[in-house]
Image (cartoon, rainbow, N blue to C red):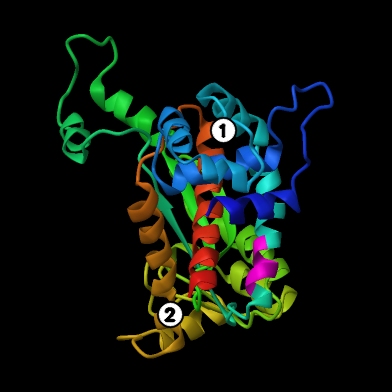
Amino acid sequence: MLLVAFELARGVLPKYFSKFSRHDFTVPQLFACLVLKEHQRKTYRDVEALLRDAPHWCREVGMGKVPDHNTLCRAFHALNLIRRGGRLLDKLAQWFSVARQLGTVIAVDSSYFDSRYRSRHYEQRCRHYAASKRAKTPVNARRSRTARLAPKLAVGVCTRSHVILAARPRTGFGGDCRDFEPLLFDAWKRHPRPRVVLADAGYDSEANHRIARHDMGVRSIIKAGIGRPGKGGPSGYYRRIMSRRLKGSQRGKTYGQRAQAETVNSMLKRNMGDALRSRSPKARRNEQMLRVLTHNIALFCDKIEG
């Protein structure tokens, strides 16, 4: 895992961020340590202790000593994966394409992450209290402010191999419709031959159908579920087609593969946790992108070992 992440970063990221840095560690080495941290669900101090117990891992990536936890924390913020993560996903998509692991169907879905480690029961109880004795603002208002800062991750997934081809981390509640075009465009750039894109009713829009079919030449299958049902059915040519065809169980049909996107979201939360450690919205988006890259690297490691 550490070695694959190092080789990935060495072909994409610069060796050093600045010529005035101490040059104790290269950027690919620090990126590999951060990927190991997310994969093992460790804190910065924990991954430092893990690397001290495994000096042969450090030697494999050319490190003469173990980076301090403060060094790893600063490297995480300096990497700015929101900006550089796209090039890393491009390289990973090339690797999976060479290994012939990319199918022709792309599924789009989104999921929310917890902003901190606390029980869901506590979150639910906060909504029933009118006010807090120790706070000047009502608890419901504080709950609303927390909801506006909720981390959200939308992904475009290859249904054949569970590879994430596109990711769009952002903050706050809101509709999914606006994420469809950037997700499909990024996946379309990285995928050599996409033919079908699948999405649930949250992405239902006539404009999204036209973007997929007319602009990118990809057949779109999106469940029609936005707006009140009328006698004449949904408005728009493609939305009416979807309302007629997507009735009943879709098991064994093309649209049934959309569940693979939900499987990927479940894999992200089961393997790396459903709560984020970062506090600021920018750091949370970087952490979500790091988890996406870790997920793809772990899949590639499984393909190599298999």
Q: In the rendered structure, which amino acid carries the disc numbered 2? A: Gln
Q: Nearer the viewer, residue 179 or 107?
A: 107
Element marked by disc 1: helix
**Circle 2 sits on which residue?**
257
Camera-side residue of 162 and 115: 162
Residue 112 in percent (x, y) is at 39, 48
**Mark 1 touching mark 2, by CB under 8 A?**
no
Instruction: Report whether residue 166 is seen.
Output: yes
Q: Quadrant of residue 147?
A: top left
- Residue that numbered label 1 is attached to: 282
Type of secondary structure dominating the magenta stretch: helix
Between the residue at mark 1 and the residue at mark 2, the CA separation in whole angstroms equals 32 Å
- In the picture provided, is 301 more to the left or to the right than 181? left
- In x, y percent, where is residue 193? 69, 81
Q: Nearer the viewer, residue 219 or 282?
A: 282
Q: Amino acid at mark 1?
A: Lys
Residue drawn 56% across and 47% down? Answer: 289
Residue 33 falls within the magenta-colored stretch? no
Asked if residue 201 lies left or right of residue 286, the reply is: left
How dense is the environment of label 1, judged by Cα within 10 Å: few (below 14), some, or many (20 and up)?
Answer: some
- Whole-percent x, y for residue 292 in the image: 52, 53
Task: Give the mark, 1 or 2, whose residue is nearer the N terminus.
Answer: 2
Give the percent coordinates (x, y) of residue 279.
45, 27
State which region is magenta.
Answer: 92-96
Res. 168 mark:
none
Q: Is residue 251 above or below residue 147?
A: below
Which residue is drawn at the image coordinates 49% and 57% (left, top)? 295
Residue closest to the far right:
19
* Residue displayed at 55% across by 27% down: 73
In the image, residue 60 above or below residue 24? below
User: Circle 2 sits in a helix, a strand or a loop, which is it?
Assistant: helix
**Rendered view: 3 above or below 162:** above
